């Protein structure tokens, strides 16, 4: 069970990320976080279930959640996140080859997002899945701090690259 402080940090993070979605969508996600927290869900599940369409159908399109081998799922989720953030640009992920992996696709996506004023923040799931969210450059530090306060173990692109690819 998550502490009240962790739950409030997750709520703050969702509020920050969902600025462009409107009050109704944001409030529904926050209600989901609080009701799932009351059921004893951990912070990772609270955040992923409320923000990632790869995790659940009721989620907002604010994060990307994939199994370690499901690199092909990153593109459609990334484009839904981009639409949620108000971007007109759509990303085309890599096509299959023997060197393709979820970490490499995430790095390619992050490299594409950077010049567009967006950063990926990666969360350590403690398992063989990947969870990341995109955030605008001006909001990156606040989002990273809220994710850390929520005990979601955020990682920068450089930290993710060292951990997953090096």
Image (spheres, rainbow, N blue to C red):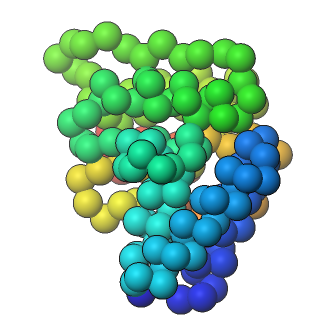
Residue 117 is drawn in which quadrant?
A: top right
Residue 33 is drawn in which quadrant?
A: bottom right
Task: Give the residue at x 72% y 24%.
Answer: 87
Task: Give the residue at x 35% y 36%.
Answer: 103
Counting from the top left corner in percent of width and height, residue 26 is at: 70, 55
Whether residue 26 is visible, yes or no, is: yes
Out of 74 and 105, give the one closest to the viewer. Answer: 74
Above or below, 116 against 51 in this view is: above
- For this orientation, the residue located farthest to the right is 138
Counting from the top left corner in percent of width and height, residue 150 is at: 57, 74
Counting from the top left corner in percent of width and height, residue 64 is at: 46, 41
Above or below, 3 against 166 in this view is: below
Q: Quadrant of the N terminus?
A: bottom left
Residue 4 is drawn in which quadrant?
A: bottom right
Out of 142 and 41, give the one closest to the viewer. Answer: 41
Above or below, 161 against 116 in this view is: below
Whether residue 122 is visible, yes or no, is: no
Left or right, residue 9 beside residue 163: right
Task: Give the residue at x 24% y 53%.
Answer: 128
């Amino acid at each position: 069970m998550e502490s009240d402080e962790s739950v409030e940090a997750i709520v703050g993070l969702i509020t920050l990320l969902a600025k462009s979605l409107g009050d109704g969508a944001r409030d529904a996600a926050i209600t989901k976080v609080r009701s799932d927290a009351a059921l004893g869900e951990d912070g990772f599940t609270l955040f992923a279930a409320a923000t990632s369409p790869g995790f659940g159908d009721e989620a907002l399109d604010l994060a990307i959640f994939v199994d370690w081998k499901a690199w092909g799922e990153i593109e459609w989720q990334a484009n839904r996140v981009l639409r949620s953030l108000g971007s007109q640009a759509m990303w085309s992920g890599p096509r299959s080859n023997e060197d393709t992996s979820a970490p490499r696709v995430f790095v390619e996506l992050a490299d594409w997002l950077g010049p567009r004023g967006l950063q990926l923040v990666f969360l350590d799931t403690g398992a063989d899945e990947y969870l990341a969210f995109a955030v605008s450059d001006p909001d990156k530090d606040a989002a990273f701090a809220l994710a850390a306060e929520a005990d979601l173990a955020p990682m920068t692109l450089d930290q993710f690259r060292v951990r997953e690819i090096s």
